[in-house]
Image: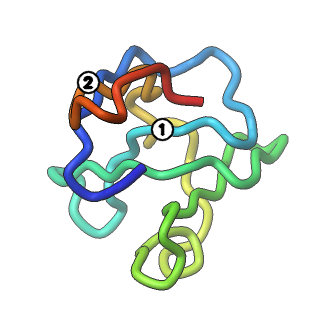
Amino acid sequence: MREGDWLIALPPPRRLRVGDLVVVRDPRDARRLLVKRATAVRPDGTCEVAGDNLTLSTDSRTFGPLPATRVVARVAFRYAPVARIGRVR
């Protein structure tokens, strides 16, 4: 993902997988949503997330693993910019 992408997100998956692009509630401010990639999924119901731009991202390296309940959606499709329209994997 890139800054400025417009995305469509669907309800969270029943089973989160490493590599899924997800929308999570920011643990520092629950009113704020973040788009991150799942980098680890643990049996205890937590996950680690990271931004695609690791040098500028605030993610699990900063705030630690998140409870799976913080995952509010899975990103499925990019609809802008036009040159990058398509499914998100």
Q: Name the residue beneath numbered marker 1.
A: 22
The quarter of the rendered structure image containing the C terminus is: top right
Q: Amino acid at mark 1?
A: Val
Which of 3/75 is in front?
A: 3
Residue 77 is labelled as none
> What colour scheme does the image use?
rainbow
Residue 79 is labelled as 2
Point out residue 50 in the picture as x, y percentages from the top left corner: 56, 63
Q: Is residue 42 left or right of residue 10?
A: right
Q: Tell me which numbered mark, 2 or 1, is placed earlier along the sequence.
A: 1
Compared to 71, does 1 lie above or below?
below
Point out residue 22 in the picture as x, y percentages from the top left corner: 48, 38
Q: Residues within 10 Å of mark 1 (few under 14, many from 20)?
A: many
Q: Residue at x 39, y 40 (%)?
A: 23
Q: Secondary structure at mark 2?
A: strand
Q: Residue at x 42, y 21 (%)?
A: 86
Where on the picture, by quarter, is residue 44? top right
Q: Secondary structure at mark 1?
A: strand
